[in-house]
């Protein structure tokens, strides 16, 4: 055969791991799938589900996830193209006055390029595709785009120009890496970007560059990401609406403090904080705070900023009474000898598990009430 290497894909089976056949009636027409989800989504699902020596199970939820990813990239690309000012971007094309977020995303992209090259050489197509998916969805869309949004509305023209170029570089390179897997959507988006080539199919494959490696920025960015996640988790657990501003107090080691001081705008944008106060010692931490420990820092949010104490006590007391009623119901049921004797053991065990769960929830509620008094 006129090829050095031949790659044979795995057998595509149904969701239960059975071969597709007429007798089982479990066959799937790829053309029907393409009509509903698109060819790119089908390709992505088949490649990410493929690993050497293992068959592929066709699951509807996987191809739906692939379509959702395509939509995510499409929407993110539209956002980037709608917000980029090409004149400003071209004016600062050679400016390297990067923020920590710029260095972080460029360095992470650089790492990805190297990893993808290694995976491709080993024919680990599924692993490579998953890595690109994770980078584009989480690091680029969920983090970097959100981190640079405040710059769009600022008066700093140079900062805008640098951010525009980084956005364009990361998006363009990400599309190039993903083109073998999703050729149609990547080509369509690429033709609307400020790219070097007319078509993505003739563009140069991305290469790793030592100049784009900023390991220090990658390490420092972890401080901000972990702290933002911590504040978000506290707000979610406390059911604090995004419209409500809260004060953020940070007790941090010197290196982390320096990072936080430069990244205050990230906290203001991503966590809806009204102000950031840096503490010097633990003695400065107020009593009524909700806290979290992150890399290099302690995060503290004043309780009064998070909740209306009277309303929260009212809500918790109602929940406490409801849990008490549920515990009484379960205990009465389990104390009924006829129920225990006649009911299947699985049902009895289920009721016991419910009782234990309700007791744990009640204890947490009581502790929470005591903490608010």
Image (spheres, rainbow, N blue to C red):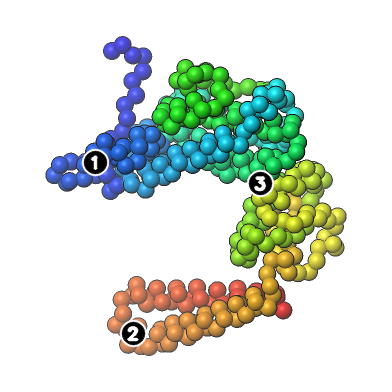
Q: Residues within 10 Å of mark 3 (few under 14, many from 20)?
A: some
Residue 256 appears in view: no
Image quadrant holding the N terminus, namely top left
From the image, tell me which residue sits under label 3.
Answer: 225
Label 2 SS: helix
The first of marks 3 and 1 along the sequence is 1
Q: Which comes sooner in the sequence, label 3 or label 2?
A: 3
Q: CA distance from mark 1 to mark 2?
A: 48 Å
Q: Which residue is mark 2?
A: 339
Q: Residue at x 34, y 24 (%)?
A: 7
Q: Could you tell me which quadrant the C terminus lies in? A: bottom right
Residue 359 percent across, percent down from the top left: 53, 77
Dot 3: element = helix
Q: Nearer the viewer, residue 336 or 199?
A: 199
For the point 63% across and 64% down, the residue is: 240
Please give the residue where the numbered disc 1 appears in the rendered image. 28
Position above or below: 62 against 131: below
Q: In the rendered view, would you say 61 is above or below 119?
A: below
CA–CA distance in space, label 3 to label 2: 52 Å
Seen at 84% across and 62% down, the residue is: 284
Viewer-nearest of discs 1 and 2: 1
- The residue closer to the viewer here, 166 or 2, is 166
Q: Earlier in the sequence, mark 1 or mark 2?
A: 1
**Residue visible at 71% across and 50% down?**
267
- Nearer to the camera, 342 or 275: 275
């Amino acid at each position: 055969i006129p090829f050095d290497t031949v790659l044979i894909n795995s057998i595509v089976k149904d969701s239960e791991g059975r071969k597709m056949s007429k007798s089982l009636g479990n066959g799937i027409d790829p053309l029907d799938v393409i009509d509903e989800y698109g060819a790119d989504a089908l390709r992505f699902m088949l490649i990410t589900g493929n690993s050497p020596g293992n068959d592929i199970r066709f699951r509807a939820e996987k191809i739906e996830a692939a379509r959702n990813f395509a939509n995510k990239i499409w929407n993110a690309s539209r956002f980037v193209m709608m917000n980029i000012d090409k004149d400003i971007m071209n004016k600062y094309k050679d400016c390297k006055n990067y923020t920590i977020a710029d260095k972080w995303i460029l360095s992470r992209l650089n790492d990805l390029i190297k990893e993808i090259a290694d995976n491709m050489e080993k024919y680990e197509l599924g692993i490579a595709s998953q890595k690109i998916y994770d980078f584009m969805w989480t690091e680029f869309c969920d983090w970097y785009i959100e981190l640079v949004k405040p710059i769009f509305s600022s008066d700093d023209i140079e900062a805008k120009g640098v951010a525009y170029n980084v956005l364009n570089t990361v998006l363009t390179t990400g599309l190039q890496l993903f083109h073998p897997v999703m050729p149609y959507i990547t080509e369509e988006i690429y033709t609307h970007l400020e790219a070097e080539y007319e078509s993505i199919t003739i563009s140069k494959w991305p290469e790793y560059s030592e100049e784009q490696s900023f390991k220090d920025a990658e390490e420092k960015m972890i401080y901000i990401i972990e702290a933002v996640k911590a504040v978000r988790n506290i707000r979610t657990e406390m059911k604090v609406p995004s419209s409500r501003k809260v004060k953020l107090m940070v007790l941090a080691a010197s290196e982390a403090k320096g990072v936080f001081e430069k990244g205050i705008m990230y906290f203001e944008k991503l966590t809806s904080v009204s102000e950031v106060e840096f503490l010097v010692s633990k003695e400065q931490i107020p009593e009524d705070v909700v806290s979290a420990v992150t890399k290099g820092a302690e995060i503290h949010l004043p309780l009064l900023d998070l909740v209306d104490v009277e309303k929260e006590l009212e809500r918790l007391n109602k929940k406490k009474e409801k849990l008490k009623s549920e515990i009484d119901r379960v205990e009465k049921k389990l104390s009924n000898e006829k129920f225990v004797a006649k009911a299947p053991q699985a049902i009895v065990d289920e009721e016991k598990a419910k009782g234990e769960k309700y007791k744990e929830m009640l204890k947490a509620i009581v502790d929470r009430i005591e903490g608010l008094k």
